[in-house]
Image (cartoon, rainbow, N blue to C red):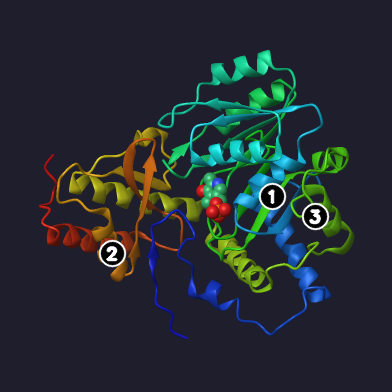
Amino acid sequence: MNIKRNILLNPGPATTTDTVKMAQVVPDICPREKEFADIMKQLRHDLVRVAHGVEPKHTAVLFCGSGTINIDICLNSLLPAGKKVLVVDNGAYSTRAVEVCQYYGLPHIDLQCSLFAKPNLNEIQAVLEKNSDIAVVYTTHHETGTGLLNPIREIGLLAHKYGAIFIVDTTSSLGMVPFDIQEDNVDFCMASAQKGLMSMSGLSFIIGNREIVEKSKDYPKRSYYCNLFLQYDFFERTGEMHFTPPVQTTYALRRALKEYFEEGENAKFARHKRVNDAIHQGIEKLGLDYVIDRKDESGLVVSVKYPTIPEWDFNKIHDYCYERGFTIYPGKISTTNTFRLCSLGAIDTPDIENFFVVFEQGLNEMGIKTPIQK
Ligand SMILES: *Cc1c(COP(=O)(O)O)cnc(C)c1O
């Protein structure tokens, strides 16, 4: 089968390999068969390895849903009665966690920090010092909207110093930048199959400390479908998801993990880095500006300000690129209009070089001379 290869520079889902796409085409199977449970078992094991966890201390629990389901599950399941969540909030994804707290009526502190720089650790410490009822500290590792990478190791150290557990949304960093659940002082991390692992959307997973999951059995139950202990316990007893899993997506993830380990973590980090370098080169050559300082950036998302020239029209340049197989993504950060170029998927530097040829052509056809004069 010949499948058109699109280069997705949006922040996930990412470009996948043909072998991952084709891995979904399998004979029909009832997911309650042992053959399928064996696949699930191997997936759980491999996912713990991706996060550098160790079994049995760490475990992975899979869910059917997009990445946001993990945020929902972790927050509603891991907060003991009478305790509070502290959200270190410096971007759209941590704000989403605050919204989850609001929907469930969870006591929480929304520590709003600058969207354009790393959070201030002294400020976090002061909040922990003042609020001895904080049981969960929560933040996002890589804020995908800006490209900012948060200092999770330091935040985790603080959380533990004050007796709280540390939950991190690693959806857009796991498997792409160095991460070690133990060394980074993380109790729970999470991701979905379509980002760092370059697989299909619809399957998400939480990797974390088994003892805490077991303890959460006695915490208030705030959701049925989205309860971490319930799903974990069902997996442990039966090897299966509690309810129907996304069958074909599961086969794709199995294949994607095989390719992940074959490429090798370090080689993959190096590839993302060279793709990101190529993006920076292209942007600088065109005379465009970034949203955040490169030193604070993850190396996975380049967030670019719209040029302030009358000929600029994001939709026009988007459509020009899209028709030629390249997808770019708009986003508003506070009051700043931006677009993003991400290095998530199965792409490499020639794809970026080809993209910039098309992008520059598109700009020129819109009447924008390059490099852009501001
Ligand atoms: C993509 C992403 C999510 C999940 O978003 P979905 O639309 O539910 O897939 C969560 N957190 C971060 C940081 C992300 O980049």
Query: Which residue is label 1 attached to?
Result: 206
Amino acid at the residue labelled 3: Gln
Give the quarter of the figure containing the C terminus. Answer: top left
Sequence order check, earlier mark of 2 and 1:
1
Q: Is residue 80 visible?
A: yes
Amino acid at the residue labelled 1: Ile
Compared to residue 8, the image places residue 279 above or below, namely above
Residue 300 at x, y percent in the picture = 43, 48
Q: Secondary structure at mark 1?
A: strand
Q: Secondary structure at mark 3?
A: helix
Query: Which residue is label 3 attached to?
Result: 231
Label 1 packing within 10 angstroms: few (<14), some (14-19), many (20+)? many
Residue 319: numbered disc: 2
Residue at (24% x, 60% y) in the render? 316
Residue 46 at x, y percent in the picture = 69, 58
Residue 91 at x, y percent in the picture = 48, 36
